[in-house]
């Protein structure tokens, strides 16, 4: 086929280009992942007592997960579009965990010295990151699928961003079930679980996001 | 020739046309794809000096990708930057696949001067998309043939096949996606 013929074929009746394609694919994927994560967390781990919602504890976790989801989703959307600049979303994606780390460190400062290890490790440090990771898997599948329909020119990086978005969704759901109260715990173990989801996204992205 | 114009000139010609194309102006879209094809050909010819036969195939593969991904274009970006990013991606992908298949690992910028001297002709692509069309599932092929080759409107194609208009559009899009995947997977040689 001549290139002219191909151009004619592509242009004929092409109609307008779809608008805001990245957002239209990523938002439902993230939302579906979030619902799956929350449902599985409540069904499998059980919800935290309602009285905990009167404290800042679950809200801190959800604010962290939500902020990171916004930043990582922004980054994933940019990495899914050829030639789109990524500096600002990348900076935001780095800044959110750093801010959480600062909050965590400040909270440890206020805890008496003898109780600091307890605040950092809580009751569930051995399982927390794994739970966040497990809860993020539906969101990971959904967000990789969303990015796959777009045009990531750096598959590993796009997979990592999609993984961080999914990890944030996992963390958001886990916040409904997690009994730990210390921001320092959240800053370490939630972040580790989200980071693992990001790494898995990067590895899968290098294979799955080719086009 | 468009590829000899400075990048700024090229972009200032292309962008207004492209914006019209994005909002559904078919003539503008056709013109944009023509301008972009010439630009891509120049870009790829320089980088595929060792494989002149691949140039037109890759131009076509890139045009198909541009079309399928036109929703990822953001009006704040230069059109040429967006298009060349896709071309570069396709080029790297080709090198990667070549490397795996043939054990070729020439870096992209390592150009053999002797091969550069002989310009490949533009005898079209070796891979024949019309043949590949035959491989598509029947509904996709029919939708493409009716609306894209025979020039029927979507409504006419819908009436002819008994499918809904949106189904025709979906089949055309899926068919082109399938075609892009086929083009990428099957080496023409």
Image (cartoon, coloured by chain):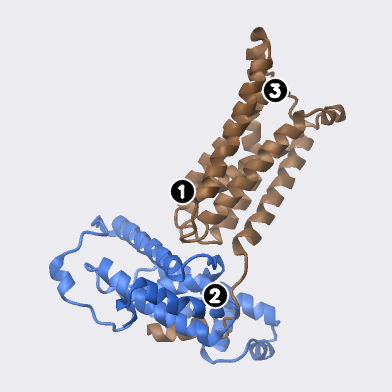
Chain colours: A brown, B blue
Q: Is residue A145 above or below residue A4?
A: above
Left or right: residue A58 versus residue A131 is: right
| Residue at 16% across, 64% down | B112
Pair 3/2: label in front: 3
Chain name for mark 3? A
Mark 1, chain letter? A
Q: Quadrant of the N terminus of chain A?
A: bottom left
**Mark sitting on residue A156:** 1
Q: Is residue A86 visible?
A: yes
**Label 2 to label 1: alpha-carbon separation:** 27 Å
Q: Where residue B110 appears, x then y in whole percent? A: 21, 59
Q: Position of residue A140 (x, y in %)?
A: 60, 46
Q: In the drawing, what numbered circle is on residue A182? A: 3
Instruction: State which quadrant residue B88 falls in.
Output: bottom left
Rendered residue at 35%/63% (across/down): B91
Q: Residues within 10 Å of mark 2 (few under 14, many from 20)?
A: many
Quarter of the image for residue B20 reads bottom right
Which numbered marker is on residue B175?
2
């Amino acid at each position: 086929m001549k290139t002219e013929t191909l151009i004619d074929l592509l242009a004929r009746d092409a109609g307008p280009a779809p608008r805001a394609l990245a957002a239209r694919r990523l938002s439902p994927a993230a939302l579906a992942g979030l619902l799956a994560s929350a449902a599985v967390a409540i069904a499998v781990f059980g919800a935290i007592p309602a009285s905990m919602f009167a404290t800042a504890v679950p809200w801190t976790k959800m604010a962290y997960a939500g902020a990171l989801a916004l930043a990582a989703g922004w980054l994933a959307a940019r990495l899914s579009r050829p030639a789109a600049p990524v500096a600002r979303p990348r900076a935001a994606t780095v800044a959110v965990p750093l801010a959480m780390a600062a909050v965590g460190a400040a909270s440890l400062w206020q805890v008496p010295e003898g109780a600091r290890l307890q605040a950092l490790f809580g009751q569930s440090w051995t399982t927390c990151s794994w739970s966040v990771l497990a809860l993020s898997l539906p969101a990971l599948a959904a967000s990789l699928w969303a990015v796959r329909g777009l045009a990531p020119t750096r598959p590993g990086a796009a997979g990592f961003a999609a993984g961080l978005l999914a990890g944030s969704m996992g963390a958001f759901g886990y916040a409904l079930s997690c009994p730990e109260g210390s921001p320092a715990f959240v800053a370490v173990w939630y972040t580790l679980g989200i980071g693992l989801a990001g790494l898995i996204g990067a590895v899968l992205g290098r294979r799955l996001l080719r086009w | 020739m468009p590829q000899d114009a400075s990048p700024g000139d090229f972009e200032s010609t292309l962008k207004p046309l492209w914006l019209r194309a994005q909002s559904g102006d078919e003539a503008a879209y056709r013109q944009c794809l023509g301008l972009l094809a010439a630009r891509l050909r120049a870009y790829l010819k320089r980088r595929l000096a060792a494989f002149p036969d691949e140039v037109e195939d890759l131009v076509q593969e890139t045009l198909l990708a541009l079309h399928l991904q036109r929703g990822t274009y953001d009006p704040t970006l230069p059109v040429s930057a967006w298009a060349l990013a896709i071309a570069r991606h396709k080029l790297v992908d080709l090198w990667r696949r070549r490397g795996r298949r043939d054990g070729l690992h020439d870096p992209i910028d390592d150009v053999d001067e002797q091969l550069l001297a002989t310009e490949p002709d533009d005898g079209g692509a070796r891979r024949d998309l019309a043949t590949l069309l035959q491989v598509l599932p029947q509904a996709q092929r029919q939708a493409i043939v009716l609306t894209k080759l025979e020039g029927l409107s979507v409504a006419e194609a819908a009436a002819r096949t008994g499918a809904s208009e949106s189904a025709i559009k979906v089949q055309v899009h899926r068919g082109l996606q399938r075609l892009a995947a086929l083009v990428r997977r099957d080496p023409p040689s």
